Amino acid sequence: LQCLQFLPFLNQKNLILHYNSDTSQTAQNVVSGLLGKMLAGSQSGNVQICVFDPIDLGGTSNMLKMLDRHVYTICARTTDMQKQLSMLDRYVEDVVQNMLQGSYTSMAVYNKGKEKQEPYQIVVFKDFPHGVTPEMAHTIRRIIVNGIRAGVQFIFMVNDDLMKMSEDFIKIGIIMQLDEPSALQATEIDLTKQPDNMREQQKYVVLDDNKLHEIVQYVNAGFEVKTEEVL
């Protein structure tokens, strides 16, 4: 795993990834590779991932579903997604007010030198904006204000085919300001404009199932050790 470089993406920016039916699998591979590299570049348990997947219910990779449940969870129902966002909203507020307290500029600075580090929270929206209500969109915008600083990041996998199908989806996009990545503190990649954006895609190494399995074993082994220490 040492050969995997730790992506500077972690705790830096959110990500907006545009795709369509022709590039759906590519989008899943890119995001799975990105998540895998973040997991491989951190101590076990220091990155926690929640995937909102109201359509397929399977997350971004069958391999990543083998991760310990404390590391990787999938939310499929709108009510569960809303609950998770509300928890994150309160979490960000608590981190800024009680942990950073004006003494630390970010979670990354707070974690430096600490034996027990606060985990980073990664939220992946698959087939965005399916399952997202206007209320949820406003909650996401509120979280984003201090999210990166508090160690909370979003990956929006925007299904451009879905966006064209519903006025409600278009309204969510307007609330979210998806056409203004800077407003969401985000980097934008558009897989629908290949091959123009192929160079951008290559920034995110796609990992095959063997490498992802190796990463899953590395993370889960860390949890086994921690459990043994407690016992």
Image: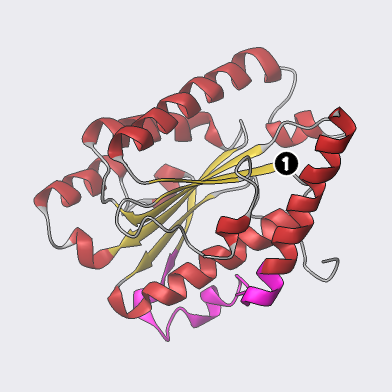
Would you identify the image quadrant in which residue 39 lies?
bottom right
Q: Is residue 36 left or right of residue 129?
A: right
* Residue located beneath label 1 in the image: 46
Indicate the amino acid at tag 1: Asn
Q: For residue 197: magenta?
A: yes
Confirm whether residue 127 shows in the render.
yes
| Local SS, label 1 | loop
User: Callout 1 environment at 10 Å: few (<14), some (14 to 19), or many (20+)?
Assistant: some
Which residue corresponds to the image point at 69% horizontal and 62% vertical from the top-left? 37
Which residue corresponds to the image point at 61% horizontal and 57% vertical from the top-left? 66
Residue range corresponding to the magenta coloring: 189-212
Give residue 40's position: percent from left, percent from top: 75, 58
The quadrant of the picture occupied by the C terminus is top right
Q: For residue 187: magenta?
A: no
Q: How many marks?
A: 1
Confirm whether residue 114 shows in the render.
no
